Image (spheres, rainbow, N blue to C red):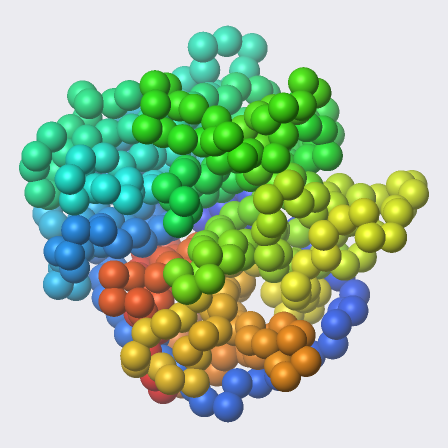
Amino acid sequence: MKLLAIFFLFSFTLLCCACNSIDKNGADQPAQDSIKLQLITSAVDMPIQVTPLPDNSHSMLITDQSGKIWMLHNDSVNKQPFLNLSTKLEQKVPTGRAHSMFSIAVHPDFAKNGKLYVCYNAPAKDTADDCMLLISEFSTNGKKDEADLQSERRIFSFECKEVYDLASQIAFGPDGYLYIAIGDHGSPAYVNRAEDLHVYNGKLLRINVNAAPYAIPNDNPFINRKDAKPEIYAYGFRRLWHFSFDPKTSALFGGDVGDIKQEEIDSVEKGGNYGWPEMEGDSIYDTKAKVVPGRYAAPINTYSHKEGICVIGGDFYYGEGIPFLRNNYVFADLTGKLFSLSKDDAGKWVRATLKVANPSKESFLICNCNRGYDNELYLSGFYSSKAGVRGAIYKIVKG
Protein backbone atom coordinates (compact mmCIF):
# COMPACT_ATOMS: atom_id res chain seq x y z
CA MET A 1 0.00 0.00 0.00
CA LYS A 2 2.89 2.36 0.71
CA LEU A 3 4.30 1.95 -2.81
CA LEU A 4 0.82 2.49 -4.27
CA ALA A 5 0.36 5.65 -2.24
CA ILE A 6 3.74 7.02 -3.30
CA PHE A 7 2.98 6.30 -6.94
CA PHE A 8 -0.40 7.99 -6.67
CA LEU A 9 1.13 11.03 -5.01
CA PHE A 10 3.61 11.38 -7.86
CA SER A 11 0.83 10.87 -10.43
CA PHE A 12 -1.48 13.37 -8.72
CA THR A 13 1.26 16.00 -8.73
CA LEU A 14 1.94 15.47 -12.45
CA LEU A 15 -1.77 15.47 -13.16
CA CYS A 16 -2.35 18.89 -11.62
CA CYS A 17 0.90 20.79 -11.67
CA ALA A 18 3.03 22.73 -14.07
CA CYS A 19 6.31 24.63 -14.11
CA ASN A 20 7.80 28.01 -13.28
CA SER A 21 6.24 31.39 -13.91
CA ILE A 22 6.63 35.12 -13.66
CA ASP A 23 4.78 36.79 -10.80
CA LYS A 24 2.32 39.18 -12.44
CA ASN A 25 0.08 40.05 -9.53
CA GLY A 26 2.70 40.53 -6.85
CA ALA A 27 2.40 39.37 -3.24
CA ASP A 28 -1.04 39.16 -1.70
CA GLN A 29 -2.08 40.53 1.67
CA PRO A 30 -1.51 38.53 4.88
CA ALA A 31 -4.63 37.78 6.90
CA GLN A 32 -4.94 39.63 10.20
CA ASP A 33 -5.51 36.50 12.27
CA SER A 34 -4.25 32.95 12.09
CA ILE A 35 -5.82 29.52 11.76
CA LYS A 36 -4.91 26.06 13.00
CA LEU A 37 -5.33 22.63 11.45
CA GLN A 38 -7.12 20.19 13.74
CA LEU A 39 -6.55 16.56 12.79
CA ILE A 40 -9.82 14.69 12.30
CA THR A 41 -8.54 11.36 11.01
CA SER A 42 -5.55 9.72 9.38
CA ALA A 43 -7.37 6.41 8.86
CA VAL A 44 -7.99 6.86 5.11
CA ASP A 45 -5.09 6.13 2.77
CA MET A 46 -5.84 8.45 -0.16
CA PRO A 47 -8.48 11.04 0.82
CA ILE A 48 -9.40 13.51 -1.93
CA GLN A 49 -12.86 14.76 -0.89
CA VAL A 50 -15.14 15.19 2.12
CA THR A 51 -18.90 15.31 1.48
CA PRO A 52 -21.57 15.90 4.16
CA LEU A 53 -24.74 13.81 4.10
CA PRO A 54 -27.90 15.99 3.87
CA ASP A 55 -29.82 13.85 6.36
CA ASN A 56 -29.14 15.63 9.69
CA SER A 57 -26.98 12.70 10.82
CA HIS A 58 -23.83 14.87 11.14
CA SER A 59 -22.08 12.25 9.05
CA MET A 60 -19.73 12.85 6.13
CA LEU A 61 -18.40 10.67 3.35
CA ILE A 62 -14.71 10.52 2.52
CA THR A 63 -13.71 9.78 -1.07
CA ASP A 64 -10.65 7.52 -1.22
CA GLN A 65 -8.94 7.74 -4.61
CA SER A 66 -8.29 4.01 -4.61
CA GLY A 67 -12.02 3.29 -4.97
CA LYS A 68 -13.48 3.26 -1.48
CA ILE A 69 -15.95 5.61 0.17
CA TRP A 70 -15.80 5.84 3.97
CA MET A 71 -18.33 7.21 6.44
CA LEU A 72 -17.05 9.65 9.06
CA HIS A 73 -19.27 10.08 12.12
CA ASN A 74 -18.30 11.87 15.35
CA ASP A 75 -14.76 12.21 13.94
CA SER A 76 -14.49 8.42 13.67
CA VAL A 77 -14.26 6.41 10.44
CA ASN A 78 -16.45 3.30 10.20
CA LYS A 79 -14.48 0.06 10.00
CA GLN A 80 -16.23 -1.07 6.81
CA PRO A 81 -16.42 1.10 3.65
CA PHE A 82 -19.69 2.81 2.87
CA LEU A 83 -19.07 1.69 -0.73
CA ASN A 84 -16.14 -0.22 -2.23
CA LEU A 85 -15.67 0.29 -5.97
CA SER A 86 -12.07 -0.89 -6.17
CA THR A 87 -12.96 -3.96 -8.26
CA LYS A 88 -14.80 -1.78 -10.80
CA LEU A 89 -11.87 0.55 -11.52
CA GLU A 90 -9.83 0.26 -14.70
CA GLN A 91 -6.93 -2.14 -14.03
CA LYS A 92 -5.24 -3.01 -17.32
CA VAL A 93 -3.79 0.43 -18.12
CA PRO A 94 -0.33 0.70 -16.52
CA THR A 95 -0.70 4.42 -15.77
CA GLY A 96 -1.57 4.73 -12.09
CA ARG A 97 -3.95 7.66 -12.66
CA ALA A 98 -6.23 5.33 -14.62
CA HIS A 99 -7.04 3.37 -11.45
CA SER A 100 -8.90 6.26 -9.87
CA MET A 101 -12.12 7.37 -8.27
CA PHE A 102 -12.34 11.15 -8.51
CA SER A 103 -15.44 12.51 -6.84
CA ILE A 104 -18.85 11.76 -5.36
CA ALA A 105 -22.05 13.77 -5.13
CA VAL A 106 -24.92 13.05 -2.75
CA HIS A 107 -28.44 13.54 -4.08
CA PRO A 108 -30.20 16.55 -2.47
CA ASP A 109 -33.03 14.18 -1.43
CA PHE A 110 -30.63 11.59 -0.03
CA ALA A 111 -32.55 11.44 3.25
CA LYS A 112 -35.53 10.07 1.28
CA ASN A 113 -34.03 8.21 -1.68
CA GLY A 114 -30.55 7.19 -0.42
CA LYS A 115 -28.94 7.99 -3.79
CA LEU A 116 -25.39 9.10 -4.46
CA TYR A 117 -23.30 9.51 -7.61
CA VAL A 118 -19.70 8.47 -8.20
CA CYS A 119 -17.23 9.59 -10.87
CA TYR A 120 -14.55 6.98 -11.60
CA ASN A 121 -12.44 5.39 -14.32
CA ALA A 122 -13.89 2.11 -15.60
CA PRO A 123 -12.71 -0.28 -18.34
CA ALA A 124 -13.37 1.12 -21.82
CA LYS A 125 -15.82 -0.48 -24.23
CA ASP A 126 -13.60 0.49 -27.16
CA THR A 127 -10.26 -1.29 -26.85
CA ALA A 128 -8.59 1.63 -28.65
CA ASP A 129 -9.31 3.83 -25.64
CA ASP A 130 -7.42 3.63 -22.37
CA CYS A 131 -10.47 3.67 -20.11
CA MET A 132 -13.90 5.18 -19.67
CA LEU A 133 -14.83 8.09 -17.45
CA LEU A 134 -18.04 6.91 -15.82
CA ILE A 135 -20.62 8.53 -13.57
CA SER A 136 -22.92 6.04 -11.86
CA GLU A 137 -25.79 6.18 -9.40
CA PHE A 138 -25.79 3.97 -6.31
CA SER A 139 -28.41 3.52 -3.61
CA THR A 140 -28.33 2.61 0.07
CA ASN A 141 -31.60 0.68 -0.34
CA GLY A 142 -32.72 1.79 3.10
CA LYS A 143 -29.46 1.11 4.94
CA LYS A 144 -27.88 3.89 7.01
CA ASP A 145 -24.18 3.20 6.70
CA GLU A 146 -23.76 1.21 3.49
CA ALA A 147 -24.52 1.63 -0.23
CA ASP A 148 -25.39 -1.35 -2.40
CA LEU A 149 -22.68 -2.10 -4.97
CA GLN A 150 -25.19 -4.03 -7.06
CA SER A 151 -27.52 -1.04 -7.33
CA GLU A 152 -25.28 0.72 -9.86
CA ARG A 153 -27.09 2.59 -12.63
CA ARG A 154 -24.79 4.13 -15.23
CA ILE A 155 -25.66 7.76 -15.89
CA PHE A 156 -22.95 9.29 -18.07
CA SER A 157 -19.85 7.91 -19.79
CA PHE A 158 -17.06 9.43 -21.84
CA GLU A 159 -14.38 7.54 -23.74
CA CYS A 160 -11.26 8.85 -25.44
CA LYS A 161 -7.54 8.24 -25.41
CA GLU A 162 -6.02 9.25 -22.05
CA VAL A 163 -9.43 10.06 -20.57
CA TYR A 164 -7.93 9.12 -17.18
CA ASP A 165 -6.32 12.58 -17.08
CA LEU A 166 -9.57 14.48 -17.50
CA ALA A 167 -11.89 13.94 -14.53
CA SER A 168 -12.22 16.58 -11.86
CA GLN A 169 -15.40 16.88 -9.78
CA ILE A 170 -19.13 16.29 -9.73
CA ALA A 171 -21.56 18.18 -7.48
CA PHE A 172 -25.22 19.09 -7.22
CA GLY A 173 -26.11 22.73 -7.61
CA PRO A 174 -28.84 24.61 -5.74
CA ASP A 175 -31.02 24.02 -8.81
CA GLY A 176 -30.94 20.25 -8.16
CA TYR A 177 -28.93 19.49 -11.30
CA LEU A 178 -25.66 17.56 -11.40
CA TYR A 179 -22.61 19.54 -12.54
CA ILE A 180 -19.66 17.66 -14.07
CA ALA A 181 -16.18 19.14 -14.61
CA ILE A 182 -14.06 17.48 -17.32
CA GLY A 183 -10.47 18.55 -17.96
CA ASP A 184 -8.58 19.33 -21.16
CA HIS A 185 -4.96 18.28 -20.97
CA GLY A 186 -2.85 15.26 -21.78
CA SER A 187 -0.73 14.37 -24.79
CA PRO A 188 -0.62 16.90 -27.69
CA ALA A 189 -3.12 14.86 -29.70
CA TYR A 190 -5.83 15.29 -27.06
CA VAL A 191 -5.11 18.69 -25.58
CA ASN A 192 -6.55 22.17 -26.08
CA ARG A 193 -10.11 21.23 -27.06
CA ALA A 194 -11.75 23.40 -24.41
CA GLU A 195 -12.99 25.89 -27.03
CA ASP A 196 -14.57 23.16 -29.19
CA LEU A 197 -18.25 22.82 -28.31
CA HIS A 198 -18.45 19.48 -30.15
CA VAL A 199 -16.55 17.71 -27.36
CA TYR A 200 -16.71 17.44 -23.55
CA ASN A 201 -13.03 18.28 -22.94
CA GLY A 202 -12.46 21.43 -20.91
CA LYS A 203 -16.12 21.88 -20.02
CA LEU A 204 -18.46 22.16 -17.07
CA LEU A 205 -21.56 20.10 -17.85
CA ARG A 206 -25.02 20.21 -16.27
CA ILE A 207 -27.56 17.36 -16.41
CA ASN A 208 -30.77 16.25 -14.71
CA VAL A 209 -30.26 12.81 -13.16
CA ASN A 210 -33.93 12.44 -12.21
CA ALA A 211 -34.54 10.91 -15.64
CA ALA A 212 -33.18 7.77 -17.29
CA PRO A 213 -30.32 7.88 -17.98
CA TYR A 214 -30.42 11.68 -17.69
CA ALA A 215 -32.13 14.72 -19.20
CA ILE A 216 -30.85 18.09 -20.41
CA PRO A 217 -32.11 21.08 -18.41
CA ASN A 218 -34.27 23.30 -20.61
CA ASP A 219 -32.19 26.39 -19.86
CA ASN A 220 -28.77 24.92 -20.65
CA PRO A 221 -27.08 27.58 -22.80
CA PHE A 222 -26.35 25.44 -25.89
CA ILE A 223 -29.37 23.15 -25.89
CA ASN A 224 -30.69 24.54 -29.20
CA ARG A 225 -27.36 24.59 -31.04
CA LYS A 226 -26.66 21.71 -33.44
CA ASP A 227 -22.91 22.41 -33.31
CA ALA A 228 -22.62 21.97 -29.52
CA LYS A 229 -23.03 19.31 -26.86
CA PRO A 230 -26.30 20.19 -25.08
CA GLU A 231 -24.87 19.18 -21.68
CA ILE A 232 -22.35 22.07 -21.71
CA TYR A 233 -22.94 24.74 -19.07
CA ALA A 234 -19.63 26.66 -19.38
CA TYR A 235 -16.36 26.08 -21.21
CA GLY A 236 -12.76 27.16 -21.77
CA PHE A 237 -11.26 25.39 -18.72
CA ARG A 238 -8.01 23.49 -18.45
CA ARG A 239 -8.94 21.53 -15.34
CA LEU A 240 -11.67 22.80 -13.03
CA TRP A 241 -10.43 20.60 -10.21
CA HIS A 242 -12.83 21.80 -7.51
CA PHE A 243 -15.91 24.05 -7.74
CA SER A 244 -18.51 25.02 -5.16
CA PHE A 245 -21.70 27.02 -4.76
CA ASP A 246 -22.14 29.89 -2.33
CA PRO A 247 -25.07 28.68 -0.16
CA LYS A 248 -26.27 32.27 0.28
CA THR A 249 -26.04 33.62 -3.26
CA SER A 250 -25.80 30.39 -5.34
CA ALA A 251 -22.71 31.87 -7.05
CA LEU A 252 -20.42 29.21 -8.53
CA PHE A 253 -16.68 29.52 -7.91
CA GLY A 254 -13.99 27.17 -9.16
CA GLY A 255 -10.23 26.70 -9.22
CA ASP A 256 -8.88 26.14 -12.75
CA VAL A 257 -5.45 24.47 -12.74
CA GLY A 258 -2.87 26.27 -14.87
CA ASP A 259 0.01 24.98 -16.96
CA ILE A 260 3.15 27.14 -17.11
CA LYS A 261 2.11 30.63 -16.02
CA GLN A 262 -0.77 31.07 -13.59
CA GLU A 263 -3.40 29.48 -11.39
CA GLU A 264 -6.86 31.04 -11.37
CA ILE A 265 -10.13 31.32 -9.50
CA ASP A 266 -13.20 31.82 -11.69
CA SER A 267 -16.71 32.99 -10.97
CA VAL A 268 -18.51 30.65 -13.36
CA GLU A 269 -21.56 31.91 -15.26
CA LYS A 270 -23.92 29.97 -17.52
CA GLY A 271 -22.59 29.99 -21.07
CA GLY A 272 -19.31 31.59 -20.01
CA ASN A 273 -16.06 31.04 -21.91
CA TYR A 274 -12.98 31.10 -19.64
CA GLY A 275 -10.33 31.26 -22.31
CA TRP A 276 -8.22 28.12 -22.23
CA PRO A 277 -6.05 27.49 -24.24
CA GLU A 278 -5.71 31.04 -25.57
CA MET A 279 -5.65 32.43 -22.04
CA GLU A 280 -4.17 31.13 -18.79
CA GLY A 281 -5.32 33.20 -15.86
CA ASP A 282 -5.19 36.81 -17.03
CA SER A 283 -2.23 36.24 -19.34
CA ILE A 284 -2.03 35.04 -22.95
CA TYR A 285 -1.07 31.36 -23.15
CA ASP A 286 -1.23 30.77 -26.89
CA THR A 287 1.05 33.46 -28.33
CA LYS A 288 -0.08 32.59 -31.89
CA ALA A 289 -3.71 33.31 -31.13
CA LYS A 290 -5.31 36.67 -31.87
CA VAL A 291 -6.97 37.34 -28.55
CA VAL A 292 -9.98 39.66 -28.86
CA PRO A 293 -10.36 41.95 -25.80
CA GLY A 294 -13.44 41.05 -23.78
CA ARG A 295 -14.02 37.75 -25.56
CA TYR A 296 -13.34 35.64 -22.48
CA ALA A 297 -14.63 35.86 -18.93
CA ALA A 298 -11.80 37.14 -16.74
CA PRO A 299 -10.80 35.25 -13.57
CA ILE A 300 -11.56 36.99 -10.31
CA ASN A 301 -8.07 36.17 -9.00
CA THR A 302 -4.80 34.68 -10.25
CA TYR A 303 -1.44 33.84 -8.75
CA SER A 304 1.87 32.78 -10.22
CA HIS A 305 3.96 29.69 -9.58
CA LYS A 306 6.11 31.69 -7.19
CA GLU A 307 3.14 31.49 -4.82
CA GLY A 308 1.88 27.98 -5.62
CA ILE A 309 1.92 25.26 -8.24
CA CYS A 310 -1.61 23.88 -8.51
CA VAL A 311 -4.85 25.56 -7.41
CA ILE A 312 -7.17 23.16 -5.58
CA GLY A 313 -10.14 25.47 -5.14
CA GLY A 314 -12.22 25.64 -2.00
CA ASP A 315 -15.52 26.74 -0.50
CA PHE A 316 -17.37 29.61 1.12
CA TYR A 317 -17.07 29.99 4.87
CA TYR A 318 -20.19 30.59 6.95
CA GLY A 319 -19.14 28.78 10.10
CA GLU A 320 -19.04 30.11 13.65
CA GLY A 321 -15.54 29.11 14.69
CA ILE A 322 -13.48 31.60 12.66
CA PRO A 323 -15.22 35.01 12.63
CA PHE A 324 -12.58 36.80 10.54
CA LEU A 325 -13.15 34.35 7.66
CA ARG A 326 -16.93 34.64 7.58
CA ASN A 327 -18.29 35.49 4.09
CA ASN A 328 -14.90 34.66 2.54
CA TYR A 329 -14.10 32.16 -0.17
CA VAL A 330 -11.32 29.98 1.23
CA PHE A 331 -9.18 27.93 -1.13
CA ALA A 332 -5.96 25.95 -1.22
CA ASP A 333 -2.94 25.16 -3.34
CA LEU A 334 -1.50 21.67 -3.60
CA THR A 335 1.64 22.89 -1.80
CA GLY A 336 -0.32 23.29 1.43
CA LYS A 337 -0.87 27.03 1.20
CA LEU A 338 -4.28 28.45 2.10
CA PHE A 339 -5.83 31.68 0.84
CA SER A 340 -9.05 33.64 1.26
CA LEU A 341 -10.92 35.95 -1.11
CA SER A 342 -13.14 38.79 0.01
CA LYS A 343 -14.53 41.91 -1.65
CA ASP A 344 -13.15 45.34 -0.77
CA ASP A 345 -15.23 48.53 -0.65
CA ALA A 346 -14.85 48.95 -4.41
CA GLY A 347 -16.22 45.47 -5.06
CA LYS A 348 -12.86 44.02 -6.10
CA TRP A 349 -11.88 40.55 -4.93
CA VAL A 350 -8.81 40.71 -2.69
CA ARG A 351 -6.72 37.66 -1.83
CA ALA A 352 -5.16 37.09 1.58
CA THR A 353 -2.67 34.42 2.62
CA LEU A 354 -3.86 32.51 5.68
CA LYS A 355 -1.26 32.02 8.36
CA VAL A 356 -1.25 28.53 9.90
CA ALA A 357 -0.33 28.79 13.59
CA ASN A 358 0.63 25.11 13.89
CA PRO A 359 2.46 24.29 10.65
CA SER A 360 3.72 20.76 10.21
CA LYS A 361 7.39 20.03 9.75
CA GLU A 362 6.39 17.57 7.04
CA SER A 363 5.06 18.45 3.59
CA PHE A 364 1.24 18.31 3.49
CA LEU A 365 -0.17 18.27 -0.04
CA ILE A 366 -3.79 19.45 -0.13
CA CYS A 367 -6.15 17.68 -2.56
CA ASN A 368 -9.44 19.34 -1.55
CA CYS A 369 -11.03 21.98 0.68
CA ASN A 370 -14.68 21.20 1.43
CA ARG A 371 -17.48 22.63 3.57
CA GLY A 372 -18.73 20.13 6.15
CA TYR A 373 -22.16 19.59 7.71
CA ASP A 374 -21.26 22.18 10.38
CA ASN A 375 -20.34 24.88 7.81
CA GLU A 376 -16.70 24.54 8.85
CA LEU A 377 -14.00 23.73 6.29
CA TYR A 378 -12.12 20.45 5.96
CA LEU A 379 -8.88 19.70 4.13
CA SER A 380 -8.10 16.36 2.48
CA GLY A 381 -4.56 15.50 1.52
CA PHE A 382 -1.31 13.65 2.02
CA TYR A 383 1.83 13.83 4.07
CA SER A 384 5.00 12.99 2.22
CA SER A 385 8.13 12.17 4.19
CA LYS A 386 11.08 9.80 4.27
CA ALA A 387 8.83 7.35 6.10
CA GLY A 388 6.41 7.30 3.15
CA VAL A 389 3.01 8.78 2.32
CA ARG A 390 -0.06 8.87 4.54
CA GLY A 391 -3.49 10.46 4.20
CA ALA A 392 -4.97 13.02 6.58
CA ILE A 393 -8.13 15.08 7.00
CA TYR A 394 -8.01 18.32 8.94
CA LYS A 395 -10.60 20.79 10.15
CA ILE A 396 -9.67 24.46 9.84
CA VAL A 397 -10.11 26.15 13.23
CA LYS A 398 -9.22 29.53 14.73
CA GLY A 399 -5.56 30.00 15.60
Residue at 66 percent of width and 45 percent of height: 272
Provide residue 363's location: percent of width, then percent of height.
45, 66
Provide residue 86's location: percent of width, then percent of height.
28, 30
Furthest residue to the bottom? 32
Position of the C terminus, as image quadrant, is bottom left
Mark yes or no: residue 246 visible. yes
Residue at 47 percent of width and 69 percent of height: 330
Q: Is residue 234 above or below residue 348?
A: above
Provide residue 36's location: percent of width, then percent of height.
36, 80
Mark yes or no: residue 45 visible. no
> Relative to 42, is 346 on the left or the right?
right
Q: Is residue 73 above or below residue 212?
A: below
Provide residue 96's location: percent of width, then percent of height.
45, 34
> Relative to 171, is 142 on the left or the right?
left
> Relative to 260, is 126 on the left or the right?
left
Furthest residue to the left? 143
Furthest residue to the front? 218
Between 207 and 142, the residue placed more toward the observer is: 207
Q: Which quadrant of the view contains residue 161?
A: top right
Q: Is residue 234 above or below residue 327?
A: above
Q: Which quadrant of the view contains residue 166?
A: top right
Q: Which quadrant of the view contains residue 364?
A: bottom left
